[in-house]
Image (cartoon, helix red, strand yellow):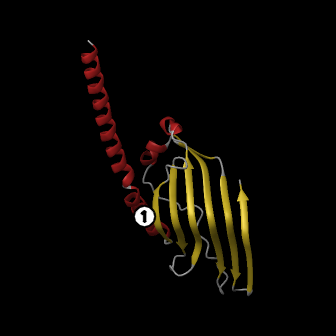
Amino acid sequence: MTRKFFSAGLSILFFALIICALAATLGMQLLGDLKTYVQISLKNVEQTTGYRITLDDIGWDIFEGTGIRVDTLVLYDAAGAIPLFECRKVHIKFDILPLFNAKLIVSRVLLDDPHFTFHRTGKGSWTLPPLAVPVDTGSISSLDAFSDFSIALKRFTINGGSLHFNDRLRNVKFDLHNMRLHL
């Protein structure tokens, strides 16, 4: 009796381990395509806005909580010559369980050493990225999949950032360094 119970227990344990290994392999395949998804999204943003976004690396940040880590994120102006935003590291942490209720709760966005640069040309126009780009969706039905989805941000942090204004029309420069912001 004990031998049969032990044998059945080991069989169930090994079957469960094999199922977990298959699920982990499938999950890592889906999660591993993060770089591909990001490159496709960045190409769409560039085509829509004209602004170019580059990054050195992006990956899942699981050890410090569920999230995404981006190394060296840079946003260039439409001409691609002037960096409007540079950040050494971006950490975006989110809660997993609310995703099952169609809620994305971003628990923390952390920008390490970001640099914001605003230029005003000699003609008087500022090189600022648009806050929202109007998108022609064709019909509202294309957005139905996301109509019940909500997004919330709990905490936003800037560590050691700088802000640069360069007004070439009035020949004025203004710089703020070592900014710390916690919202």
Identify whether 35 is placed above or below 19.
below
Looking at the picture, tell me which residue is in the foreground, 63 or 83: 63
- Residue ID at (61%, 76%): 127
Looking at the picture, tell me which residue is in the foreground, 10 or 127: 10
Q: Badge 1 is on which residue?
A: 44
Residue 45 visible? The answer is no
Looking at the picture, tell me which residue is in the foreground, 177 or 163: 177
Q: Position of residue 150 (x, y in %)?
A: 55, 42
Q: Quadrant of the N terminus?
A: top left
Q: Position of residue 99 (x, y in %)?
A: 50, 39
Indicate the quadrant where residue 27 lies: top left
Question: In the shown orientation, is residue 120 left or right of residue 105?
Answer: right
Going by the picture, which residue comes out furthest to the top?
A: 1
Q: Position of residue 19 (x, y in %)?
A: 30, 35
Q: Amino acid at mark 1?
A: Asn
The local crowd at label 1, few if under 14, some if 14 to 19, many if 20 or more residues have their Cα within 10 Å, is few
- Residue ID at (30%, 40%): 22
